[in-house]
Image (tube, rainbow, N blue to C red):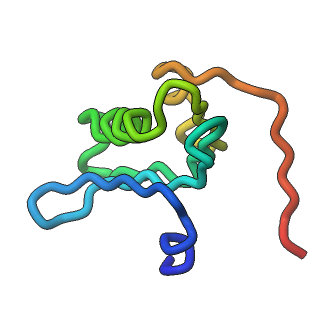
Amino acid sequence: MEGMLSNSNLVVTAWHDDKLIGIARCLTDFNYACYLSDLAVAEEYQKAGVGKGLQSALKSRLGNKCKIILIAAPDADDYYGKIGYQRSPRCWVMQPV
């Protein structure tokens, strides 16, 4: 976990008092592409707008030209289409050997 966070160059978090309730972790050049590696919201805070708020905070830091690219977890597949993402067939994944 420490390596994942320390090697990301854009991380946005959501808090409720002193409890971490959401995180968006990215790699980006801040100009062309932002790879949203993780978007996670604590289960009890889901469907309360936390994920949308994290993505809005990302967009405000990225500016108008940078697109957000992500690979959705199977359970979240329907969510992204509803909030404006478009499905792309152009993704390839190479697993570590």
Q: At which x and y percent is residue 22?
A: 33, 53
Residue 81, compared with residue 46, is above or below; it is above
The image quarter in which residue 92 lies: top right
Residue appearing at x 37%, y 34% in the figure: 60
Q: Nearer the viewer, residue 44 or 61?
A: 61
Q: Nearer the viewer, residue 37 or 43?
A: 37
Residue 90 placement, left or right of 62: right
Quadrant hosting residue 48: top left
- Compared with residue 87, is residue 18 higher up or lower down, i.e. above or below? below
- Which quadrant does the C terminus fall into? bottom right
Q: Residue at x 84, y 33 (%)?
A: 90
Residue shown at 65% from the left, 39% from the top: 33
Find residue 11 and report its horizontal and vertical position in percent.
42, 57
Above or below residue 7? Residue 53 is above
Position of 63 with respect to 51 (left or right) is: right
Q: Position of residue 86 (x, y in %)?
A: 64, 21
Residue 49 versus residue 64: which sits nearer the camera? 64
How many numbered tags mark residues here? 0
Q: Residue at the spot x=32%, y=51% of the render?
A: 43
| Residue 30 percent coordinates (x, y) | 56, 43
Name the quadrant containing residue 89.
top right
32 or 58: nearer the viewer? 32
